[in-house]
C-alpha cells in the first residue's frame, strides 16, 4: 500500500466517522460541544507525497509563537 492510498483511506474513515457522529448528534437535537476542537485544513499542501497542510491548529500555534516572541522582545528591551 502506498502512502497516498493510506492517506485516502484515513480521510474516508475520518469522514465516515464524523458523518456518523454528526448524524447521531443531530438526531438527538443538540450541538456537539467537541466540534470546536476539530482540526480543519486551511491550505491543502502535498509535497513529495506528504500531507503538510496548514490547519487551524497550526495557525493557532503560529499566533502563539509570535505573541511569545513579541512579549519577550517587549519585556527585555532597554
Image (cartoon, rainbow, N blue to C red):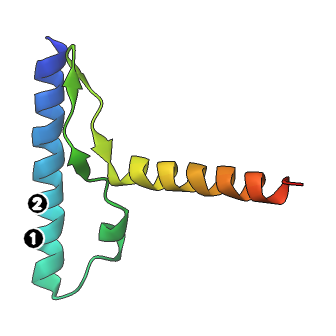
Q: Which residue is drawn at 49% across and 48% down?
A: 62
What's the mark number on residue 15?
Answer: none
Residue under circle 1?
23
Give the answer, above or below, for where 1 lies relative to 66: above
Place of residue 11 in the rendered image (x, y in percent of width and height, measured from the top left): 15, 39
What SS does tag 2 mark? helix
Give the answer, above or below, for where 26 lies relative to 46: below
Left or right placement of residue 9 versus residue 50 in this view: left
Give the answer, above or below, for where 5 lies relative to 2: below
Q: Residue at x 18, y 76 (%)?
A: 25
Neighbor class of circle 1 (other Cα within 10 Å; few <14, some 14-19, many 20+) is few
Residue at the limit of the structure toward the right, as seen here: 78
Number of marks drawn: 2
Place of residue 43 in the rendered image (x, y in percent of width and height, measured from the top left): 22, 44
Q: Residue at x 28, y 76 (%)?
A: 32
Left or right placement of residue 56 versus residue 73 in this view: left
Left or right placement of residue 48 versus residue 35 in this view: left
For the residues bearing labels 2 and 1, Cβ distance under 8 angstroms: yes
Q: Choose between 58 and 24: the one closer to the eye.
A: 58
Residue under circle 2?
19
Place of residue 75 in the rendered image (x, y in percent of width and height, measured from the top left): 82, 59
What SS does tag 1 mark? helix
Q: Residue at x 31, y 53 (%)?
A: 39
Q: Choose between 15 and 77: the one closer to the eye.
A: 77
Q: In the rendered image, which quarter contains the C terminus?
A: bottom right
Q: What is the distance, in whole Å, between disc 2 and disc 1 at their CAs?
A: 6 Å
Q: In the rendered image, which quarter contains the N terminus?
A: top left
Place of residue 8 in the rendered image (x, y in percent of width and height, measured from the top left): 11, 30
Amino acid at each position: 500500500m502506498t502512502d497516498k492510498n493510506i492517506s485516502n483511506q484515513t480521510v474516508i474513515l475520518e469522514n465516515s466517522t464524523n458523518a456518523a457522529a454528526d448524524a447521531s448528534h443531530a438526531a438527538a437535537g443538540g450541538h456537539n460541544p467537541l466540534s470546536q476542537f476539530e482540526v480543519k485544513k486551511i491550505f491543502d499542501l502535498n509535497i513529495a507525497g506528504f500531507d503538510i497542510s496548514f490547519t487551524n491548529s497550526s495557525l493557532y500555534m503560529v499566533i502563539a509563537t509570535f505573541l511569545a516572541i513579541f512579549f519577550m522582545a517587549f519585556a527585555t528591551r532597554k
